[in-house]
Every structure is written in C-alpha cells, then in structure tokens.
Image (spheres, grey):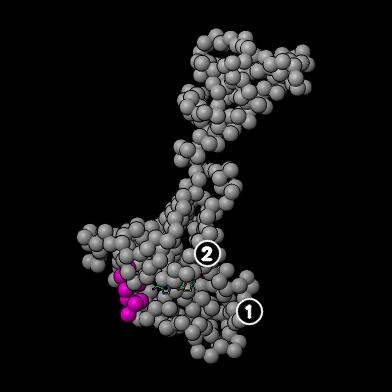
Amino acid sequence: KMISIFSPALHKQRHQFVIDFVKKNKPRRVADLGCSECRLLKQLRFHREVQLLVGLDTNAVFVHSFRHGLAPLSTDYLQPTYNQLRVELYQGSVTQRDARLRGFDLVTSIELIEHLTLTDLEHFSAVVFGYMTPVSVIISTPNSEFNVLLPGLSGFRHSDHKFEWNRAEFQSWALKVCSDYGYEVEFTGVGEAPQGQQDSVGFCSQIGVFYRLKDRDRCSVLAGSDEENVFSYTLLYSVNYPSLHDNNTLRRVLVSEVLYWAEQLKNRWIEEKSGGRNGDFTRCQTVGSVPMEGKKAGIYVSVPLAVMWSWCPKVRELSESLGNLRHLLMDEPQVKLSQDGSAVLDSEYSEDSQCSYSVEQEEDWEANV
Ligand code: SAH
C-alpha cells in the first residue's frame, strides 16, 4: 500500500494530530464524523478532559463491530477516577442535522469530505459549521499535489473518493466556509515530503483547523431555534464510564476501601497489643471474643471512624469529611457500624456473639482528628 512510505503510518499521524490538539486545547465534548472503526475515539477516551465522545458514521456495520473496543476496561471499574466520560456512537450522515451533536468543543472529520459529492459537501458545511457550530473543527483530506510522490498511484487514492483537492482548492473551500459561517482557519498537514520537495508538493494529508469566531452571532446563517429538536441519527451504542462523581460508584469504592482498612487496622492493633506496645491504635476496642480457635485469638475489634480517617488518605479523599464518611456508610449492608455510628465493627461480629462491647465516650470525635 502506498501509505507505507510513512513512518508512523499516515493514518496514525492524522490521529496523533488530533490527540495533540486535544492535549493542548482540552475540549470536553468531542465528535468524530466518519469514525469508521472508532480508532481515533478509542485513543481519545484516555484523555481526562474529554467528558463526551461521540462517533458518527453512515456505515452501521463498522460502528457495530467495533463498538466493544470502546467499552470501559475492568480497571475502569476497579479503580475509577473522578473523570467523567460518556461515549455515544450513532449511525447517520453528516449531511443531516441532529440536535445531539450541537454545542461541541471539537468536531473532527478525518479523511471524510473526499467521500462526499460536491452537493453533499454543501450540506456537510451547513450541518457542521452552520448547525452543530462547534468551537473548533479539524478537517483532513488528501492533498492531490502529493500524489506524484505516491508510488504506483494512478487516479484517486481510494476508489470511493469523489474528489481529491490540491492545496489551493482546499483552501478556497475552507475560506468560503469561514466567511459563510463565521469561522477562521489555519492550514497545516501531516505526512511530510522528502527534503527539498516540501514546498512544492505540501503535506500528503492536508488539514484545516477551524475556530469559531467570537462575534459570529452576527452571521446571518445561524440555525433558528425551531430546528433544535431534529433527531436524524440512530444511537447504536452508549456507555457511561464509572466515575467517582457517580454516587453509587463512590460508595462501592469507599466501602471496599473501608472494609480493607478495617481489617488492616484491626490486625495492626492486635499485633501491637500482643507485642505489649500501645501505639496509635489504642482507641480500637475489643468488642467481643470468640472461642480460641484460629491463630488470631479470636477477638472482635471495632475501629473508630476517626482512627480510620486519620490513617487512610484514600478514605479521606473519597468521603471528604468525617461526618460524610459516617453518613455514606450508614446504610451500607456490607459495613457494620457501632450503634452511635462512630466505629466500624468487625465484619465477623454479630449481635449474637458474646459481647463486651462498650461504646467509646461520645467525645467530639469529628474535631478529634
Ligand atoms: N475517519 C476515519 C475513516 C475515514 S474513511 C479514519 O480516520 O480512519 C471515511 C468514513 O466516512 C467511512 O467510514 C465512511 O463510512 C464514512 N462516511 C462516508 N460518508 C459519510 C456520511 N455522509 N456521513 C457520515 N459518515 C460517512
């Protein structure tokens, strides 16, 4: 294939261009038009600033067979972060409007426009720049001037291409779009020609980066509000990545953290106790005992939340305040709290156990950390 003359491969360079742009400009909502195998989307989901990633393609087969690559990984569930990410894949055409793609920070169209007839390209411009009106748009398309350097190529680079433009053609189209819809554009590209030929042929893929003008509201072509409820795309796939902003996810992580630390603190306390030392865990209490069976002398221990709070940064980070920690754990079936809610009871402990539990003095334990 002709593209193998580039290293890294040309399609990777195009996607890297978008990724670099995302790193720099930190868009929150990104839509990739003509997303095909969703390769670009797959890479973009690792960028924490991105909160909504949308892919659109007419070819549902593509989108359908590659959507699984966009599902959260098990680590996303096990160690969720505060990042929020939602992914949506649609079947639909860029020549049609759909209100769900309005108001994005970045819309990308990588090697798409050359697949459109010139009539459809007009619709594309009106839909993307006149209706979606994203803050920025990245459009890449072949630069036909470069074709002389592609070995064995006659005609277009792909049989489905309706046109391949030289730099002047692309730039005059882009500038027309800008003046019609209130954008400005910078021209660049990826896939460099050999030394000495760079000026004469340009980049293999030419790229226009468009920015919406601040005062574009004065443009006459703005879509009216009556068009706000157009839904012409079909949602094929959507997923919300687990996020600590989601209360259920937060609780799940907090509970497993609390259970883990209750066990850790209990064991440390038992160790200190048997070593005759009185360390920081003195405020843990024996709440009951079981017949000596295992090695661990079978005692039940309660771990005050205040102790856990001062020992476990992750618990602090997740719960934000001691009061909130207690509140979050109150209705958790997996965590047993003491009656006053100030301590985590041993997970082995049950009311039936012979119990010498004594409630710690109700000190001002929130202030006591
Ligand atoms: N952007 C991808 C692939 C580009 S190939 C990449 O960077 O690798 C062009 C893609 O555009 C194909 O998947 C094709 O199905 C899609 N396409 C063609 N016409 C379209 C239209 N009118 N609306 C949306 N997608 C279209």
Q: Position of residue 230 (x, y in %)?
A: 28, 62
Could you tell me the amino acid type at mark 2?
Phe
Secondary element type, mark 2: helix
Against 188, residue 360 (above or below) is: above
Residue at coordinates 29% horizontally, 60% vertically from top-left?
215
**Image mark for residue 5:** 1
Label 2, label 1: how many angstroms apart (C-alpha)?
Answer: 27 Å
Q: Quadrant of residue 267?
A: top right
Q: Quadrant of residue 169?
A: bottom left
Q: Is residue 262 visible?
A: yes
| Mark nearer the N terminus (2 vs 1) | 1
Secondary element type, mark 1: helix
- Start-end of magenta stretch: 119-127
Q: Which residue is mark 2?
A: 66
- Circle 2 crowding by C-alpha within 10 Å: few under 14, some 14–19, many from 20: some
**Image mark for residue 263:** none
Nearer to me, 352 or 231: 352
Q: How many marks?
A: 2
The image quadrant where one finds the N terminus is bottom right
Nearer to me, 92 or 205: 92
Residue at coordinates 44% horizontally, 74% vertically from top-left?
112
Could you tell me the amino acid type at mark 1?
Ile
Against 201, residue 288 (above or below) is: above
Nearer to me, 279 or 194: 279
| Magenta residues, dominant SS class | helix
Residue at coordinates 52% horizontally, 83% vertically from top-left?
157
Q: Nearer the viewer, mark 2 or mark 1?
A: 2
Furthest-front residue in view? 352
Nearer to me, 148 or 200: 148
